Image (cartoon, rainbow, N blue to C red):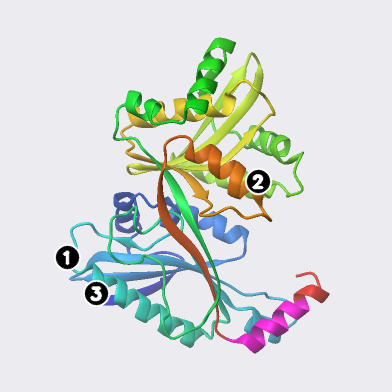
Amino acid sequence: MEVVVTYDNPRNVDEWNALCKECGNYLQTTMRSELSKFYGQRQVYFEVVDNVRIVGGVKLEIWQSKKIGFLIPKISKSLSQFGEYILRCDCEKTDVVVRLLNQRIAEYVNEERIVTFSVKGFYSSEYISTNHSLLYEDSCRKVFSQVDFDVAYIDLTRSIDDIYAGMHMKHRNMISKAKRQGLDFEKIECDSQIMNMMLSETYSEQNKKSPNRQYIEKEIDVGRKSGISRMYVCRMGDVILSCALVNVYGKTADYSFGGNRKNDCGAGQYLQYNICNDLKRSGVEWYSLGQVAKTIDENNLKFSEGITRFKMRFGCKRYPSKKVFYVFSPVKYWVWRTLCKVFVR
């Protein structure tokens, strides 16, 4: 086995994306290259090849500021991993594949003089049923910061009756209320204007800023063109009360973005219940509602208590994941952060 490193695209785009689909890993596909360009990042592909056939790999993204001559790029050079390694299911040497990836990435960090490396899980290694972490690990480097969290999955291999029965009683009551109120569920064309409107509505009563509108437009445009994204809404008459953007790849679906207009009709619960129905009919086996907190955080009760509780009441299973931040050059990092506080990038 050998590790091949390429920029912008893997050796064989179709083969790479097919392996991503086998793993249900949309984040690691080549389809999202436009989103990398939006943030000024360049994609770097690491492929473990065995007799010409790819058996595993990961897409990383490299970034550096291009301002103020030669100095700033050197002290701002960063690498990021978003989403787990992809591994071929029939490969009997996954331990070797993971070790080769970690070793080659460590070499790349030194070759490119990377200052920081952000590693964030999305699907969870345990959900993918492997005994190995599918996030980069560097045992020789000190972790600068780490955040542990869980990923909430709804098991769609069960019957819809079992899925409904597994929900918390309060969620089932709200679904029944939504039916009595005459709410309508609909799958619509992906529309960034609707999503941005609903996100603005959702964040209007929060201190937190809503996601970047241009990024949402790019995300939806990429998903629509590739046929990956689906958009669902829950209405009362002509008024949209709840909406969701869901990405479907292989047998895995993930809740990407969503927005809600304040209501007491059970719109959010009714929306997700019907999404489960639609995904199940499409052959999807696992539906991720995304990140949930492991414990209560008094400084962030809205997420750690409110949002986490809402998701888990759908009868989700928890799978552990994490976000790790490495600093390979503390001095460069300190200078860069200091400059960022003084000047706008």
Query: 10 Å neighbourhood of mark 1: few (<14), some, or many (≥20)?
Result: few
Within the image, what quadrant is residue 89 found in? bottom left
Residue 82 visible? The answer is: no
| Residue at screen point 67% across, 24% down | 263
Q: Are marks 2 and 3 in contact (CB under 8 Å)?
A: no
Decide which of tag 2 and tag 3 comes sooner along the chain: 3
> Which residue is denoted by mark 3 in the rendering?
96
- The question of residue 337 being in magenta is answered with yes
> Which residue is denoted by mark 2 in the rendering?
302
Whole-number angstrom distance, CA of label 1 to CA of label 3: 9 Å
Image coordinates of residue 136 in percent, x first then y, are 41, 72
The boundaries of the magenta stretch are 329-339
Amino acid found under the numbered disc labelled 3 = Val
> Which residue is denoted by mark 1 in the rendering?
92
Amino acid found under the numbered disc labelled 1 = Glu
Q: Is residue 328 above or below residue 167?
A: below
Q: Is residue 198 above or below residue 249?
A: above
Amino acid found under the numbered disc labelled 2 = Lys
Looking at the image, is mark 2 or mark 3 nearer the viewer?
A: 2
Q: Is residue 171 above or below residue 178?
A: below
Work out whether residue 225 or residue 337 is closer to the camera in this orientation and state it: 337
